[in-house]
Image (cartoon, coloured by chain):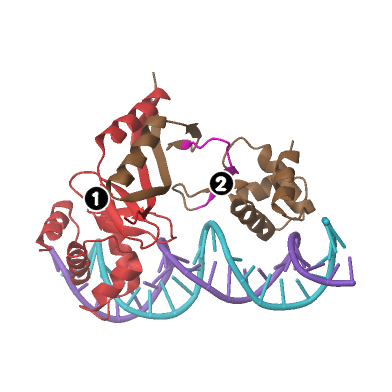
Chain colours: A brown, B red, C cyan, D purple
Amino acid sequence: MSSNIEKLCLEKGVRLTEQRKLVAKVMSESGDHPDVDELHKRISKLDSKISIATVYRTVKLFEEAGIFSKHDFKGGKARYEQSPKEHHDHLIDINTGEIIEFVNEDIEKLQKKVAEKFGYKLVDHRLELYGSKIKK
Amino acid sequence: MSSNIEKLCLEKGVRLTEQRKLVAKVMSESGDHPDVDELHKRISKLDSKISIATVYRTVKLFEEAGIFSKHDFKGGKARYEQSPKEHHDHLIDINTGEIIEFVNEDIEKLQKKVAEKFGYKLVDHRLELYGSKIKK
DNA sequence: ATAATTGCAAATGCTTTGCTTGTGA
DNA sequence: TCACAAGCAAAGCATTTGCAATTAT
């Protein structure tokens, strides 16, 4: 259901347009991390007239509202996902581009510790693992 | 001394031009992580005619030769440093842009473990901490 | 000598923006 | 109604590239 994201929009005072509903719907049905172009392609199947500029604007709007999360993985194009309830990091298959989400509390704690050791409050972080499948 | 980098070029069969020597020299005297534009500015003081295209080409060449390391921190512009002998990660001050290098073996090990847990060989990783100074 | 490199400007790829028309609350 | 959003094309930015002139080996 996209009512999920639509609810969030109402809460945040984000005006609900047809296009925004579509971006929300398509993203909520995507299990992966599409870039804007891919997202636009998927949405175009439901509304062939939607402009990619609108997708760019919406995706940015949703990100600023905390509804989407943006990732700048290697590759040059920003990729998005619905903001997850619990934080996670990413393991990226360098051969297929497939993305695996993972959580590791030990690493999280160590990161915080490192920052504090240097007199910093950890505000954000980026952890990406790039690997290739071990064939057995 | 830039003879350091120049030696590496000879070893790798990279032809040494005036411009490349300058890129090497300026980078070896930079303690920070300049982007291409900043690097070009610094080099221009020694050779006011060097083209930014050449700096782009050289920086990429050196990266492919393993002489420089490229980082895509938040901010949109790639930043470079001389490839360090031992690997390190970065803690970035979100207010000043200052970068602190750190090494944490525990995190390194855990990353490898995570990748293996999912059946992957860890080939590369990106770990960036973003923080703000704790005032005391 | 001659294959590789430079400088310049034009081209690229992703993303943003100005402007006019359309639309949700 | 009317402030805000969409669509389109043009603009922006970082980076790359084609080509003629120059240079390192």
Residue A60, above or below C5: above
Q: Quadrant of the C terminus of chain A?
A: top left
Q: Chain of mark 2?
A: A
Classify residue B124 as left or right of residue A67.
left
What's the residue type where badge 1 is placed?
Answer: Gly
How many residues crowd around disc 2 within 10 Å: few (fewer than 14), some, or many (20 or more)? some
Quadrant hosting residue D24:
bottom left
Evaluate whether label 1 is on the same chain as label 2: no
As for residue A81 lying within the magenta part, the answer is yes
Quadrant hosting residue B74:
bottom left
Which residue in the structure is indicated by mark 1? B66
What's the residue type where badge 2 is placed?
Answer: Ser
Tag 2 secondary structure: strand
Query: Could one spot residue B43 in this view of the protein?
Result: yes
Residue B92, above or below D1: above
Which residue in the structure is indicated by mark 2? A69
D20, B4: nearer the viewer: B4
| Farthest-out residue, front | B136
Which region of the structure is painted magenta? Answer: A77-89
Label at residue A78: none
As for residue B13 lying within the magenta part, the answer is no
Tag 1 secondary structure: loop
